[in-house]
Image (spheres, rainbow, N blue to C red):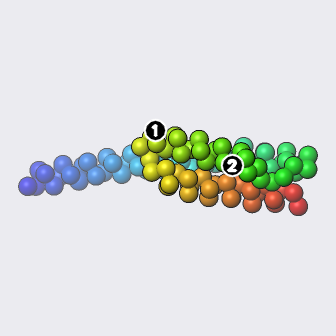
Amino acid sequence: MTDDASRAAELLKEHRASIDRLDAILVYTLGERFKRTQAVGRLKAAHGLAPSDPAREDQQIARLEDLAHQADLDPEFAKKFLNFIIQEVIRHHIEHQK
């Protein structure tokens, strides 16, 4: 039993280390994504373009849902996550237009 508990503890430690690395990847990836969307916001503001593009947003959500299916990720979760990101991006774009 002690060997099983020790092995479980070691596996838990490995899983958590992997999760920590993936969290770091997510944070850095989001950082890069927001750098790009900030550049888009500045470009839109400079040229008087609307801060949001509903057609593009719909395409991105559909694309992400497809990717979620391929990645065995709940598409509803993926959709909620992307909607949250889109709303944050639009908020930044509106700020650039002030």
Image point 85% across, 45% down: which residue?
A: 43
In this view, the residue in front, 9 or 65, is 65
As shown in the figure, which amino acid type bears the numbered disc 1?
Gln
Report whether 79 appears left or right of 95: left
Report whether 24 appears left or right of 10: right
> Looking at the picture, how far across and down is residue 25, in whole percent?
52, 44
> Looking at the picture, how far across and down is residue 89, in whole percent?
71, 54
In the picture, the quarter occupied by the C terminus is bottom right
Residue carrying label 1? 70
Label 2 crowding class (10 Å Cα cut-off): few <14, some 14-19, many 20+?
some
Please tell me whether mark 2 sits on a helix, a strand or a loop: helix
Label 1 crowding class (10 Å Cα cut-off): few <14, some 14-19, many 20+?
few
Image point 59% across, 41% down: which residue?
A: 63
Counting the numbered discs, the total is 2
Image mark for residue 57: 2
In the picture, the quarter occupied by the N terminus is bottom left
Q: Quadrant of residue 72?
A: top left
